Amino acid sequence: MRVALLGAGHIGQTIARLLNDSGDYQVTVVDKSEAALAKLGAGITTLCTDTGDPRQLLAALRGHDAVINALPYHLAILAATQAREVDCHYFDLTEDVAATRAIKQLADGASSAFMPQCGLAPGFVGIVAHHLTQQFETLHDVKMRVGALPAFPTNALKYNLTWSVDGLINEYCHPCEAIRDGRCLEMLPLEGLEHFSLDGVEYEAFNTSGGLGTLCETLQGRVRSLDYKSVRYPGHRDLMKMLLEELQLKDEQDTLKTLLRKAVPSTMQDVVLVFVTVSGLRGGHLVQEVFARKIFADRREDAPLSAIQITTAAGVCAVVDLFREGALPQAGFIRQEQVALPDFLSNRFGRAYQQSRHVESIA
């Protein structure tokens, strides 16, 4: 399969190497930064072009079977539009709700496939949640909790930059979809604070935007409550709420992003936490099923990978691989929950989640 991979950042580079090393994909990495493309090294085809220019992007996509979009979320609609123009299958990592809705409209009647939100959350967590819901006759509550956290928090925010600052601020500032009492509604970001512990470590979780993907639409009328929250170490939410609301940096997002990039160090030493609970009736009894897992960074000296690189790249590579094998619809809009969890975990790329450590104790 000939794949145009848009974006040569940390995630894009990981995707490129995984697909290229598999031997089943001809990958061309497209980015506007020569420096970023140079980091890919020999053996991977690259193209330096302005990915924000519609005509240049269209030319870059021609001749490919599929496009994987690993660009910032605000370019998702442009990339999907140009993919439809050249009849190219489209996959991305966006968590942006508005972009996903627009891509769903683009997919209507298309002869090619459109599958956004193929990362960790939205993405893998939705596959897990939907799989668990199939085990119940009557659904009550679905709770999805995901965190990409520093393994060694040292600052007041108890946070290090592990992925896109643009994506981080986006999920902190936009309304959050949820289901309450069987009705779809929007919740405020940073609200709904709760605390829990795994393996003796204390965490907090609060509403953030985008993590549910299309599950609200899929489960509406079947579930009593459904929500998604980001996991952080205790105290993080209050400080972000102060920055965004009290200092009004929600209205000065470029300023906030500059401050975070300047003052908050990035780290490759991170851990990804996935914690999903589903409750309901089975055989007339109230039952709860839990999926809890931690994925750690790969600290090999020759090719270190952060946990967020591993999980995000594995997510999109696995669904593209399943699509190539014919395990997913070949046209129109594809939801993450159409992926069978056993198929995902047995896939050569999805095994990155299977090989992670199961959490033994939950409180």
Image (cartoon, rainbow, N blue to C red):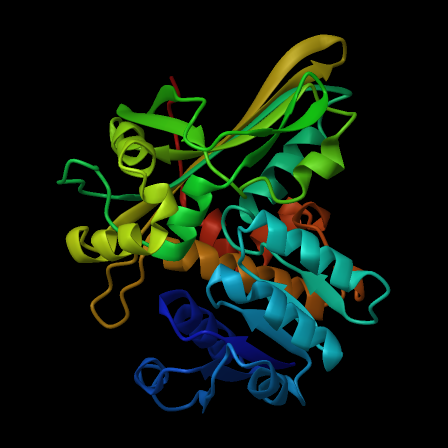
The answer to which of 224 and 337 lies nearer the viewer is 224
Relative horizontal placement of residue 360, taking residue 229 as reference (left or right): left
Q: Position of residue 134 (x, y in %)?
A: 73, 32
Q: Is residue 223 left or right of residue 188?
A: right
In this view, the residue farthest toward the right is: 109
- Quadrant occupied by the N terminus: bottom right
Can you see residue 322? yes
Residue at point 24% right, 42% down? 159
Question: What residue do we see at 42% from left, 53% from top?
Answer: 167
Q: Quadrant of residue 57?
A: bottom right
- Above or below 327: residue 248: above
Q: Position of residue 267 (x, y in %)?
A: 22, 55
Position of 34 with respect to 325 (left or right) is left
Image coords of residue 63 (percent x, y): 67, 90
Give the answer, above or below, for where 77 lies relative to 98: below
Q: Position of residue 9 (x, y in %)?
A: 37, 70
Question: In this rendering, would 165 be left or right of 107?
Answer: left
Q: Nearer the viewer, residue 172 or 324?
A: 172
The structure residue drawn at horizontal position 42% and vertical position 90%, both measured from the top left corner, is 43
Above or below, 302 against 30 in this view is above
Front residue of 85/151: it is 85
Q: Residue furthest left?
A: 154
Q: Quadrant of the C terminus?
A: top left
